[in-house]
Amino acid sequence: MPQFDDFEIKMLDILQRDGRKPVSELAQEIGLSTTPCARRFEALQSAGIIKGFAAVLSRRAVGLLVEVFIQVRLVTHSDGSPETFIAAVQRMDEVSSCWTMTGDYDFLLHVMVPSVDELNAFVMHRLMRLDGVRDVHTQLVLQNIKGPGHVPLGHLRR
């Protein structure tokens, strides 16, 4: 695991909350001058620790009223089905995230669509028709309590 000093940990924590903070303000908050802060920032980007910056959108404000998690089980893993499934999911705009999982299901998808009718069409006419898909289990999100999440940094301070 890479080693981080207190300045870098503070910097990462602040940037997760406000990725648009100017380096001059960031430097002041963490207790460095601007030039060393900028060098550390660039080093964290170059190392792939800071992967990028993005706007966080309200799904409801853009008309995506239905949010679900869908567990997917494949028929087999030995015929290229996982690779085929992954390639198909990467092309599906409705799928915001996809993870491979241990347990009863092989994949967990985070999906957002405008309506229950759109969800039905997505599951029945697209997802279930992919080669190798055995079954799916859909869970409707009632309320998002926390997230999208930040990366916890407390373990770096130990």
Image: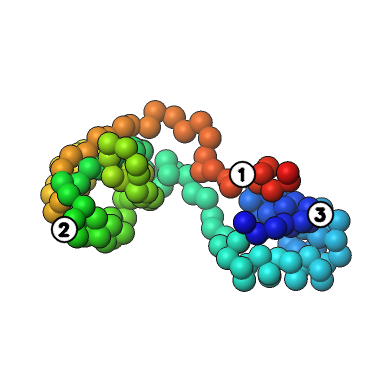
Horizontal side of residue 58 vs 40, given as left or right: left
- Spatial CA distance of label 1 from label 3 is 18 Å
Residue placed under numbered mark 2 in the picture: 79
**Residue 30 image label:** 3
Kindly identify the amino acid type of the residue bearing the numbered disc 3.
Answer: Ile
Whether residue 27 is visible to the viewer of this picture, yes or no, is: yes
Q: Which quadrant holds residue 158?
A: top right
The N terminus - image quarter: bottom right
| SS at mark 3 in the image | helix
Question: Mark 2 belongs to which amino acid?
Answer: Asp
Q: Are marks 3 and 2 in contact (CB under 8 Å)?
A: no
**Left or right: 8 in relation to 119:** right
User: Which residue is the extreme one toward the top?
Assistant: 142
Give the residue displayed 60% in from the left and 61% down from the top: 49
The kind of secondary structure element at disc 2 is loop
Of marks 3 and 2, which one's residue comes earlier in the chain?
Answer: 3
Residue at 31%, 59% in the rendered image = 90
Local crowd size for mark 2, using a 10 Å CA cut-off: few (<14), some (14–19), many (≥20): few
Which residue is more in the foreground, 105 or 36? 105
On screen, residue 35 above or below 14: below
Closer to us: mark 1 or mark 3?
Answer: 1
Relative image position of residue 108 (x, y in whole percent) = 33, 43
